[in-house]
Amino acid sequence: MKLTESLKTLLDEETALRFQRRACAAGCTAAELLRDMVFHLEYGVTFGEHVAQSRRHALSREGSTAALTPSDQSPQAAQLSVINSRGGAL
Protein backbone atom coordinates (compact mmCIF):
# COMPACT_ATOMS: atom_id res chain seq x y z
CA MET A 1 0.00 0.00 0.00
CA LYS A 2 1.44 3.32 -1.05
CA LEU A 3 0.64 6.21 1.27
CA THR A 4 0.17 9.27 -0.92
CA GLU A 5 -2.63 11.36 0.61
CA SER A 6 -2.22 13.92 3.35
CA LEU A 7 -4.68 14.80 6.13
CA LYS A 8 -4.32 18.00 8.15
CA THR A 9 -6.19 19.91 10.79
CA LEU A 10 -5.67 22.95 12.96
CA LEU A 11 -5.70 22.67 16.75
CA ASP A 12 -5.22 24.99 19.66
CA GLU A 13 -1.75 24.87 21.21
CA GLU A 14 -2.76 22.95 24.36
CA THR A 15 -4.58 20.21 22.43
CA ALA A 16 -1.68 19.85 20.00
CA LEU A 17 0.81 19.52 22.88
CA ARG A 18 -1.39 16.94 24.63
CA PHE A 19 -1.60 14.89 21.42
CA GLN A 20 2.16 15.12 20.88
CA ARG A 21 2.74 13.93 24.46
CA ARG A 22 0.35 11.02 23.90
CA ALA A 23 2.23 10.09 20.73
CA CYS A 24 5.57 10.27 22.54
CA ALA A 25 4.21 8.00 25.29
CA ALA A 26 3.20 5.51 22.58
CA GLY A 27 6.70 5.65 21.06
CA CYS A 28 5.71 7.32 17.81
CA THR A 29 5.31 10.69 16.17
CA ALA A 30 2.06 12.65 16.16
CA ALA A 31 1.69 11.87 12.45
CA GLU A 32 2.09 8.12 13.05
CA LEU A 33 -0.45 8.18 15.87
CA LEU A 34 -2.90 10.17 13.74
CA ARG A 35 -2.48 7.65 10.91
CA ASP A 36 -3.10 4.77 13.34
CA MET A 37 -6.20 6.50 14.70
CA VAL A 38 -7.58 7.01 11.17
CA PHE A 39 -6.91 3.37 10.27
CA HIS A 40 -8.46 2.22 13.56
CA LEU A 41 -11.55 4.33 12.88
CA GLU A 42 -11.93 3.10 9.30
CA TYR A 43 -10.69 -0.52 9.52
CA GLY A 44 -10.77 -1.42 13.22
CA VAL A 45 -6.98 -1.96 13.30
CA THR A 46 -3.90 0.28 13.35
CA PHE A 47 -1.88 0.88 10.19
CA GLY A 48 0.82 -1.54 11.36
CA GLU A 49 -1.76 -4.24 12.05
CA HIS A 50 -3.35 -3.60 8.65
CA VAL A 51 0.02 -4.05 6.93
CA ALA A 52 0.77 -7.20 8.95
CA GLN A 53 -2.63 -8.67 8.05
CA SER A 54 -2.02 -7.94 4.37
CA ARG A 55 1.40 -9.60 4.53
CA ARG A 56 0.04 -12.66 6.36
CA HIS A 57 -2.71 -12.94 3.76
CA ALA A 58 -0.17 -12.74 0.92
CA LEU A 59 2.05 -15.34 2.59
CA SER A 60 -0.88 -17.66 3.30
CA ARG A 61 -1.67 -17.64 -0.41
CA GLU A 62 1.88 -18.87 -0.92
CA GLY A 63 1.53 -21.42 1.89
CA SER A 64 4.13 -19.88 4.20
CA THR A 65 2.86 -18.09 7.32
CA ALA A 66 5.76 -19.14 9.56
CA ALA A 67 7.75 -16.03 8.57
CA LEU A 68 5.34 -13.67 10.34
CA THR A 69 4.42 -14.54 13.88
CA PRO A 70 2.67 -12.01 16.11
CA SER A 71 4.79 -10.52 18.88
CA ASP A 72 3.55 -9.96 22.43
CA GLN A 73 4.00 -6.18 22.41
CA SER A 74 4.64 -4.43 19.12
CA PRO A 75 4.81 -0.63 18.74
CA GLN A 76 1.45 -0.79 16.98
CA ALA A 77 -0.06 -2.61 19.98
CA ALA A 78 1.23 0.16 22.25
CA GLN A 79 -0.32 2.78 19.97
CA LEU A 80 -3.62 0.90 19.86
CA SER A 81 -3.65 0.71 23.66
CA VAL A 82 -3.37 4.51 23.74
CA ILE A 83 -6.29 4.78 21.30
CA ASN A 84 -8.35 2.28 23.28
CA SER A 85 -7.60 4.03 26.58
CA ARG A 86 -9.69 6.92 25.24
CA GLY A 87 -12.51 4.56 24.26
CA GLY A 88 -11.60 4.90 20.59
CA ALA A 89 -12.63 8.54 20.71
CA LEU A 90 -10.73 11.02 18.60
Image (cartoon, rainbow, N blue to C red):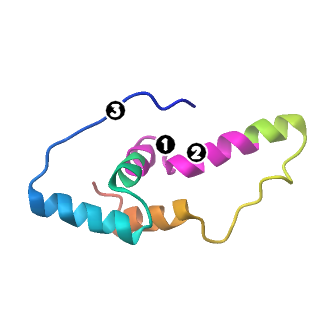
72 to 20, vertically: above or below:
below
Range of magenta residues:
36-56
Q: Quadrant of the N terminus?
A: top right
Depth-wise, is mark 2 or mark 1 nearer the camera? 2
Please give the residue where the numbered disc 1 appears in the rendered image. Answer: 43
Local SS, label 3:
loop
Instruction: Pick the residue in front: 18 or 84.
Output: 18
Quarter of the image where one finds residue 12? bottom left
Please give the residue where the numbered disc 3 appears in the rendered image. Answer: 6
Q: Quadrant of the C terminus?
A: bottom left
Q: CA distance from mark 3 to mark 2?
A: 18 Å
Q: Is residue 55 magenta?
A: yes
Spot occupied by residue 20 in the image (x, y as percentages of width and height): 27, 62
Indicate the amino acid at tag 1.
Tyr
Answer few, some or many: residues within 10 Å of disc 2's Cα (few below 14, many 20 plus, some between 14 and 19).
some
Spot occupied by residue 73 in the image (x, y as percentages of width and height): 60, 70
Indicate the amino acid at tag 2.
His
Look at 84% across and 34% down and name the residue there.
Answer: 61
Look at 38% across and 28% down and name the residue there.
Answer: 5
Indicate the amino acid at tag 3.
Ser
